Image (cartoon, rainbow, N blue to C red):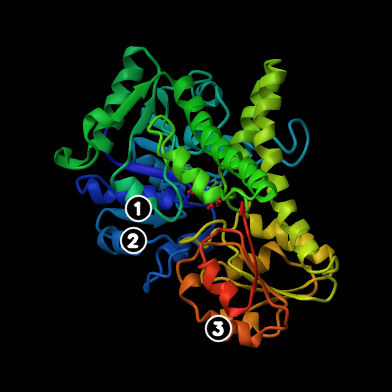
């Protein structure tokens, strides 16, 4: 068995993860393959215009690309020369057939398994990196080891916990790395090989006591459970926010004091427009589907409540604007500040901003969207909708607007010249700060009507 690594899928997970694996394992060759030629060309671009924006990513790629990290569309050679194969292809929520709207679409993943089997020239360790339904490793094992192949494939589950915007930091200093493997001898040997990858050359990367090993099913379920519990915290604090607005309490104060209890902790208690991103909704829906398929209907309903609360939070944003803007939004101009699902990323998958934009569009609002990194994705997400303009400069976006609706907590937004914005807007001018990141008292002093979440 050689030490080389291939990753199938050069996306948000595959790209950054492999860049850091290559950095911390200079003695291994790491090859990232993708069927998407444009994506691979971007990863290889001479001026490092990489296909995804992630703070610190470019520095790592500059260090390792061409040294021991390579991007290619040639899956055949890559699978032949590497004995550890990560699978990081997309597994979006299925939009057709059985399980539509909830289950994961596994077609890309199964195609990868079949490709690996077809191209293999020796024993391989297969590492599931995409988030997958529990027991997928068993299906992968069945496909790979079916028939009388001379080669043995050992399937491990190694879920990724990195968050976008902090991917490189999370990868370099993870809270934990999780590796699930079969309990037999071959399985445990494969687990040990993967532990060595994460320990890094000369044990310079993840301390071995932070590399946790479990059986395969526990690892697969842990990923869903971890994301569902994080999503549930966001929905819980958003449910409290609604009550704060009704009673005059302040959700940030409540969260600060609740979070001071060390049993609860202070992270993931920020009320806002609801969670977005490629993982939370998909993983909670997956959990719901899994519960239902085992007849656990009360459990399914419980987790589904997390999603319902999240959708409600976005609908509430529009209802509150409606009420505050004299029950008519038609033809009014709203400047949407931020479209990414959170700051420091250009990613807009499941972004609350898209749902809110569509609801506002139904009310015939004229929308002017600005975002430092996500405008190209916004254009794609809202393609076909009228009355929307995409503007680089937030000051231009706000000109003549009736309201600024802040959706993403980009750190540049609190630093803007809000007096200048106020003077360029139609009066009465409103700011709806759905992230509670602006100095709301100062805005009121300038003359703005201010709406916030949970206040
Ligand atoms: C998440 C998990 O954190 C990560 O471990 C997993 O691997 C992938 O899914 P990510 O989606 O990149 O990562 O972002 P995260 O920082 O978790 O935020 C998710 C969403 O929740 C964002 O829309 C964010 O704005 C929102 N959020 C988060 C809140 O509204 N309040 C909070 O307190 C925290
Ligand atoms: P994630 O957030 O899970 O990384 P992305 O959608 O960002 O998901 O990336 C997944 C990548 O996997 C995409 O670039 C897609 O082109 C690639 N992909 C999908 N199917 C295959 C396949 N059969 N072979 C190679 N790459 C694939």
Point out the tag, 3 or 1, that comes first from the N-terminus. 1
Point out the tag, 3 or 2, that comes first from the N-terminus. 2
Q: Which of the 4 image quarters holds residue 158?
A: top left
Spatial distance from mark 3 to mark 2, Cα to Cα? 34 Å
Disc 1 secondary structure class: helix
Residue 56: which numbered mark, if any?
Answer: 2
Mark 1 residue crowding within 10 angstroms, few (<14) / some (14–19) / many (20+): many
Decide which of 269, 228 is in the foreground and name it. 269
Say whether residue 399 is left or right of residue 123. Answer: right
Quadrant in which the C terminus is drawn: bottom right
Say whether residue 265 is left or right of residue 383. Answer: left
Taking the spot 42% from the left edge, 34% from the top edge, the residue there is: 120
Decide which of 54, 329 is in the foreground and name it. 329
Q: In this view, does 115 lie above or below 34?
A: above
Number of marks in picture:
3
Decide which of 233, 326 is in the foreground and name it. 326
Taking the spot 49% from the left edge, 78% from the top edge, the residue there is: 416
Q: In this view, does 120 lie above or below 392?
A: above
Say whether residue 388 is left or right of residue 210. Answer: right
In percent of width and height, residue 207 lies at: 21, 35
Q: Is mark 1 within 8 Å of ligand 1?
A: no
Report which residue position mark 1 lands on: 168
Residue 419: which numbered mark, if any?
Answer: 3
Contact, CB < 8 Å: mark 1 with mark 2? yes
Task: Report whether residue 44 is seen.
Answer: yes
Point out the tag, 1 or 2, that comes first from the N-terminus. 2
In percent of width and height, residue 16 lies at: 39, 52
Disc 3 secondary structure class: helix
Contact, CB < 8 Å: mark 3 with mark 2? no
Taking the spot 37% from the left edge, 47% from the top edge, the residue there is: 17
């Amino acid at each position: 068995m050689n030490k080389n690594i291939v990753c199938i899928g050069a996306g948000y997970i595959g790209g950054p993860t492999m860049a850091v694996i290559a950095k911390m394992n200079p003695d291994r060759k790491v090859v990232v393959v993708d069927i998407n030629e444009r994506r691979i060309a971007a990863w290889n671009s001479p001026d490092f215009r990489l296909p995804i924006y992630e703070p610190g990513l470019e520095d790592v790629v500059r260090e390792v690309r061409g040294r021991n990290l390579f991007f290619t569309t040639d899956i055949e050679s890559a699978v032949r020369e590497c004995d550890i194969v990560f699978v990081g292809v997309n597994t979006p929520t299925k939009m057709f057939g059985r399980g539509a709207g909830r289950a994961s679409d596994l077609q890309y993943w199964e195609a990868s398994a079949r490709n690996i089997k077809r191209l293999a020239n020796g024993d391989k360790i297969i590492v599931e990196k995409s988030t997958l339904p529990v027991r997928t490793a068993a299906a992968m094992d069945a496909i790979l080891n079916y028939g009388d192949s001379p080669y043995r494939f050992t399937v491990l589950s190694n879920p990724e916990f990195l968050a976008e915007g902090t991917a490189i930091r999370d990868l370099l200093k993870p809270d934990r790395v999780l590796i699930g493997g079969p309990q037999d001898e071959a399985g445990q040997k494969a687990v040990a090989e993967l532990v060595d990858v994460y320990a890094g050359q000369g044990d310079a990367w993840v301390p071995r006591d932070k590399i946790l090993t479990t059986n395969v099913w526990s690892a697969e379920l842990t990923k869903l459970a971890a994301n569902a519990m994080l999503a549930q915290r966001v929905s819980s604090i958003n449910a409290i926010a609604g009550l704060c607005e009704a009673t005059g309490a302040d959700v940030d104060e409540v969260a600060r004091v609740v979070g001071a209890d060390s049993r609860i902790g202070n992270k993931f208690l920020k009320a806002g427009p609801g969670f977005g991103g490629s993982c939370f909704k998909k993983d909670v829906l997956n959990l719901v589907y899994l519960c239902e398929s085992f007849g656990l209907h009360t459990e399914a309903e419980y987790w589904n409540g997390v999603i319902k609360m999240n959708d409600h939070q976005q609908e509430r944003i529009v209802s509150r604007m409606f009420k505050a803007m004299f029950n008519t939004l038609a033809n009014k101009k709203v400047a949407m500040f931020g479209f990414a699902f959170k700051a420091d990323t250009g990613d807009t998958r499941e972004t609350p901003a898209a749902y809110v934009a569509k609801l506002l569009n139904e009310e015939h609002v004229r929308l002017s969207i600005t975002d430092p990194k996500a405008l190209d994705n916004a254009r794609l997400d809202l393609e076909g909708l009228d009355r929307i303009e995409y503007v680089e400069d937030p000051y231009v976006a706000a000109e003549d607007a009736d309201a600024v609706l802040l959706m993403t907590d980009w750190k540049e937004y609190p630093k803007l010249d809000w007096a200048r914005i106020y003077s360029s807007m139609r009066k009465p001018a409103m700011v709806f700060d759905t992230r509670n990141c602006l100095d709301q008292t100062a805005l009121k002093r300038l003359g703005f009507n201010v709406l916030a979440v949970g206040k």
